[in-house]
Image (cartoon, grey):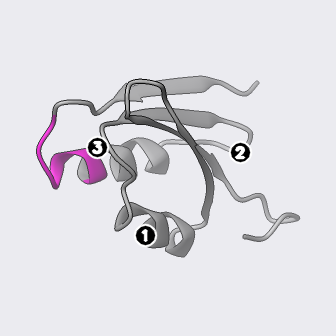
Amino acid sequence: MSRVMNLDNRGLEPPEPMIRTLEAAAALGEGDVLVVLNDRRPMFLYPRLEQKGFRHETDDLSDGGVKITIRRNSPDRPA
């Protein structure tokens, strides 16, 4: 059974948002989703996620922040 995990990193100073996001992503099982709220696009996070086998989408929010949706790549669906 898949689950959705939410993580609110708004208001945190770097590198805390990246550390928290990578730790939460590591706990994802196949089919799970991590939804992260950040103050800005985490440009240094994206390559780290891809390197660790995750895919991500980023949506801009009306308040100027972003919502990042992260999923673990399944063996039959490479990055």
> Do tag 2 and tag 3 residues touch (Cβ < 8 Å)?
no
Other-residue count near label 1 (Cα within 10 Å), few / some / many at <14 / 14–19 / ≥20: few
Mark 3 and mark 1: Cα distance apart in space: 13 Å
Residue in the image at 56% along x and 69% along y: 50
Give the residue type at disc 3: Arg
* Circle 1: element type: helix
Region in magenta: 12-18
Furthest-right residue in this view: 76
The residue at which mark 1 appears reads as 48
Give the residue type at disc 2: Glu
From the top left corner, tell me how far across and down residue 38 is, in percent.
35, 38
Task: Tell which tag, 1 or 2, sits nearer the viewer.
Answer: 1
Which mark is on residue 20?
3
Which mark is on residue 30?
2
Residue in the image at 66% along x and 35% along y: 32
Image vertical order of residue 24 relative to residue 5, above or below:
below
Other-residue count near label 3 (Cα within 10 Å), few / some / many at <14 / 14–19 / ≥20: some
N-term mark: 1 or 2:
2
Q: Nearer the viewer, residue 14 or 4?
A: 14
N-term mark: 2 or 3:
3
